[in-house]
Amino acid sequence: MTACSLTFLGTGTSHGIPVIGCTCSVCTSSDERDTRLRSSVLLEDGGHALVIDTGPEFRLQALKHKITHLDAVFYTHDHADHINGIDDLRSFSRHGPLRVYASRAVVETIRVRFPYALDADVVAGGRPHLLLTVIQPYETVTVGTMNVTALPILHGGDEIFAYQIGSLGYVTDCSEVPQKSVEYLRGLDTLVVDALRRFPHPSHFSLFEALGLISHVGPKHAYLTHLSHGFAHQKLEEELPPSVHVAYDGLVIPIGGENEKEKELYH
């Protein structure tokens, strides 16, 4: 894979940060890195673009980051904070259907929740035109120069997908990584991993568990995402190992090139 870039469109939990009605120090923080939309990333290789997950704020994320074209969408799972922005894909499928990749279970969920997006006979109002495609565990799909491999992981009792894209691993909403998937994550340049909170959760990594996976697979650099309001960005950044960083909305990092130093989009 040639060099591409990853933009963190959102790095928050299902609540988003600030949490509605919460007055904690993170939800009222003046540090804009503590404002976290629902988790999603954009990958671009210079000529092609894909996103992983479209949460409820996807329209706002697309406008903020001036996304005008997508070649594909990949879904990790079908929870609302990862899929409910699917209707806004209409803007990326005006000139032909947009290919959407997901597990068989997620494809079926989309068919049930959003039937109008798949019914060619529906003509009233705007709708996305989607070409749903089942991606099998450990199958690789190529988008431009980006080779995207679906890696099964556990999200509590559910099997969902993480993704390996060349030298990048994207692992969100994770409580356990099966050994076969672990092998795909070893020795990558960059690993993005779920770290919901400090104490254990039944369907997400805690900070301790996320750092354990990072240590086990040994990426050159790692970024924590899907963060709750239990973490203030600056305070957490100061306590992490030198090669581990706190992701934040708008952060852009190069993937697959020689320079792995992060660059900021608007700081």
Image (cartoon, helix red, strand yellow):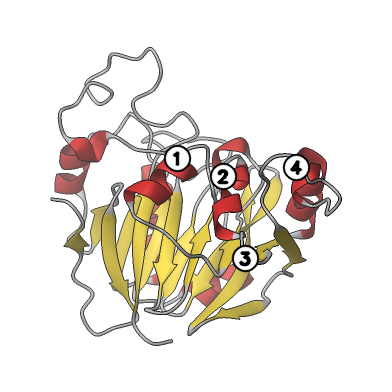
Q: Is residue 63 left or right of residue 33?
A: right
x and y percentages locating residue 221 in the rendered image:
28, 68
Q: Earlier in the sequence, mark 3 or mark 2?
A: 2
User: Does residue 56 sit above or below 160 in this rendering?
Assistant: above
Q: Nearer the viewer, mark 3 or mark 2?
A: 3
Tags 2 and 4 in contact by the CB under 8 Å rule? no
User: Does residue 122 sit above or below 200 in this rendering?
Assistant: below
Query: Is residue 225 something one can see in this rendering?
Result: no
Residue behind mark 1? 38
Residue behind mark 4? 114
Q: Earlier in the sequence, mark 3 or mark 1?
A: 1
Q: Nearer the viewer, mark 3 or mark 4?
A: 3
Are there few (<14), some (14-19), or many (20+) residues within 10 Å of tag 1? many
x and y percentages locating residue 71 in the rendered image:
55, 70
Q: Which amino acid type is marked by label 1?
A: Arg
Tags 1 and 2 in contact by the CB under 8 Å rule? yes
Are there few (<14), some (14-19), or many (20+) residues within 10 Å of tag 2? many
Label 4 secondary element:
loop
Q: Nearer the viewer, mark 2 or mark 4?
A: 4
Label 1 secondary element:
loop
Tags 3 and 4 in contact by the CB under 8 Å rule? no
Residue behind mark 2? 82
What distance separates the C-alpha of mark 3 from that of mark 2?
25 Å
Label 2 secondary element:
helix
Residue located 27% across and 61% down the image: 252
Q: Which amino acid type is marked by label 4?
A: Phe
x and y percentages locating residue 38 in the rendered image:
45, 40
x and y percentages locating residue 134 in the rendered image:
76, 65
Residue behind mark 3? 95
